[in-house]
Image (cartoon, grey):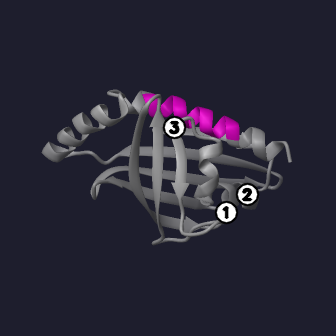
Amino acid sequence: MNVTITIDAPARVVYDAISDVSRMPHWSPELDWVSSPHDGPLTAGERFAGYNRRGIQIWRTTSTVTSAKPDRTFAIDVTAAGIPVARWSYHVVGHGDTTELTSTWSDLRAGPLGITMKILGFAATGVWDRANHNRLGMAQTLDALKAELESR
């Protein structure tokens, strides 16, 4: 699933924002806090913990940066209890002073273990239809990112 937005900011500014995962809770309606190895853009292979909140429900995930190509692509694989859950990626296309940013979410919960993970995910988050829930959250996140970057 993809959500795309155009931001009035150069590709470097957009990439630096999305690859500094400590900033993501400012924009995301669900990601509450990030424990990152450092401030600033992360590189491939680095890991971080994400603490998510929906109402009173709180859950933790671990993410590994799988692609970090400045001004082009930033992607992470998310696990819960060491089991693959999702892949999030951001594709950056610069057009001078504007940038097209596409956020992509892929559900990695497949097979019999995936069904179990979906049930456990529902118990932890209260969300059964994760695809539609994430589509709305992705749009909110990109809108908030756009507002912040364009206000500079």
- Residue corresponding to mark 2: 11
In the image, residue 128 above or below residue 112? above
In the image, residue 30 above or below residue 86? above
Q: How far apart are the alpha carbons under marks 3 and 2?
A: 25 Å
The residue sitting at 69% across, 61% down in the picture is 16
Task: Assign the N terminus to one quadrant of the image.
Answer: top left
Residue 118, image x, y percentages: 25, 37
The residue sitting at 49% across, 45% down in the picture is 104
The residue sitting at 76% across, 38% down in the picture is 147
Instruction: Tell me the amino acid under the disc marked 1.
Output: Asp
What residue range appears in magenta? 133-144
- Residue corresponding to mark 1: 71
Please, what secondary structure does the residue beneath circle 2 have? helix
Residue 86, image x, y percentages: 37, 48
Instruction: Tell me the amino acid under the disc marked 3.
Output: Glu
- Residue corresponding to mark 3: 30
Whichever of labels 3 and 1 marks the residue nearer the N terminus, that label is: 3
Q: Nearer the viewer, residue 29 or 5?
A: 29
Residue 143, image quadrant:
top right
The residue sitting at 37% across, 34% down in the picture is 125
Residue 56, image x, y percentages: 44, 30
Instruction: Tell me the amino acid under the disc marked 2.
Output: Ala
Could you classify mark 2 by the number of other residues whose Cα lies within 10 Å: few (under 14), some (14-19), or many (20 or more)?
many
Please, what secondary structure does the residue beneath circle 1 have? loop
Q: Is residue 41 left or right of residue 54?
A: right
- 143 is within the stretch colored magenta: yes
